[in-house]
Image (spheres, grey):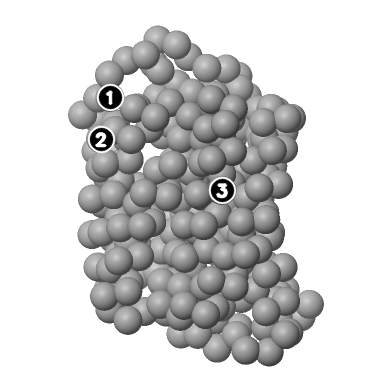
Amino acid sequence: MSWLTVFALIVSGVFVGFINTLAGGGTAISIAVLMMLGLPANIANGTNRIAVIFQNITSVQAFNQKKLLPWRKATLLALPTIIGSVIGAWIAIDINEAFFRKAMAIIMLIMLVFVVVKPSVWLKEKKHLTEKPVSIFELIIFFLIGIYGGFIQIGVGYYLLAAIVLGSGFDLVRANAIKVWIVLLYTLAALMVFIFNKQVHWQFGLVHAIGNVIGAWIATRLAIKRGVEFVRWVIIVVILVFSADLLGFISIKQIIQHL
């Protein structure tokens, strides 16, 4: 592996770790970089999971130190997501990725309306929801999110944030803490499927993870220090950029190739 490859993997990992921790969608950069370095799409999809795991271990530790992670409820929400992720990973090859990318862009833009027009929905914790037991409806939603996350990972953070904030009542900072714990657990399960099918490039994945850990460390501390309003604006910017990519107005992959 050349030093240029190492540099590309680490630097891109910093951006990915930062974006994924505060919002989601950074995986689009990971997969674009890994494919640019010669990996087929399916192996890039599997390899990316290594960096995601290390990035979320870093974030979970930081959020837990500040006592922002409600372990019991977060783990209950993670269980159906883990089951869904295994299913999603197994069917990854057979799903029409183009359809999912367009659907995800539409959903992200709908979320943008809520984030911009009704910020109070995202900024204030709702005790009457956070203290309620996990419902069957929530379990089904997180199971479906798990299928998508196991399939391609890109943008799954937005679905999780929407479900955790709108469905479970947590503010954006605590929702991010819950999100990174759920992603860590289900990604471990999905990675096993990719390893079994020999769709992981360990060398690229571990080097990329170095950057992801740095980015996650920076993002977590900014989220804790700056609060929900900062996280909200990061989400707005990232949604706009990745929606433009998903709808074909820009190409993150081509931008990376020209850097």
Position of 172 compared to 5: left or right? left
Please identify, in this view, whether the residue under mark 2 or under mark 3 is nearer the observer.
3
* SS for dot 3: helix
- Outermost residue on the top side: it is 128
Q: Are marks 3 and 1 in contact (CB under 8 Å)?
A: no
Answer with mark 2 or mark 3, whichever residue precedes in sequence: 3
Above/below status of 156 relative to 74: below
* SS for dot 2: helix
Position of 171 compared to 7: left or right? left
Q: Which mark is residue 139?
A: 2
The kind of residue on which mark 1 rests is: Val
Residue identifier under label 3: 58
Q: CA distance from mark 2 to mark 1?
A: 7 Å
Residue 81: x %, y % from top left: 30, 46
Q: Residues within 10 Å of mark 2 (few under 14, many from 20)?
A: some
Answer with mark 3 or mark 1, whichever residue precedes in sequence: 3
Residue identifier under label 1: 134
Q: Are marks 2 and 1 in contact (CB under 8 Å)?
A: yes
Answer with mark 2 or mark 1, whichever residue precedes in sequence: 1
The kind of residue on which mark 2 rests is: Leu
Q: Nearer the viewer, residue 90 or 192?
A: 192
Please identify, in this view, whether the residue under mark 3 or under mark 1 is nearer the observer.
3
Position of 180 compared to 83: left or right? right
Position of 69 compared to 241: left or right? left
The kind of residue on which mark 3 rests is: Thr
Whether residue 151 is visible: yes
Residue 23: x %, y % from top left: 59, 45
Examine the image and state in which quarter residue 168 appears.
top left
Examine the image and state in which quarter residue 103 appears.
bottom left
Q: Residue at x 52, y 32 (%)?
A: 64
Q: CA distance from mark 2 to mark 3?
A: 26 Å
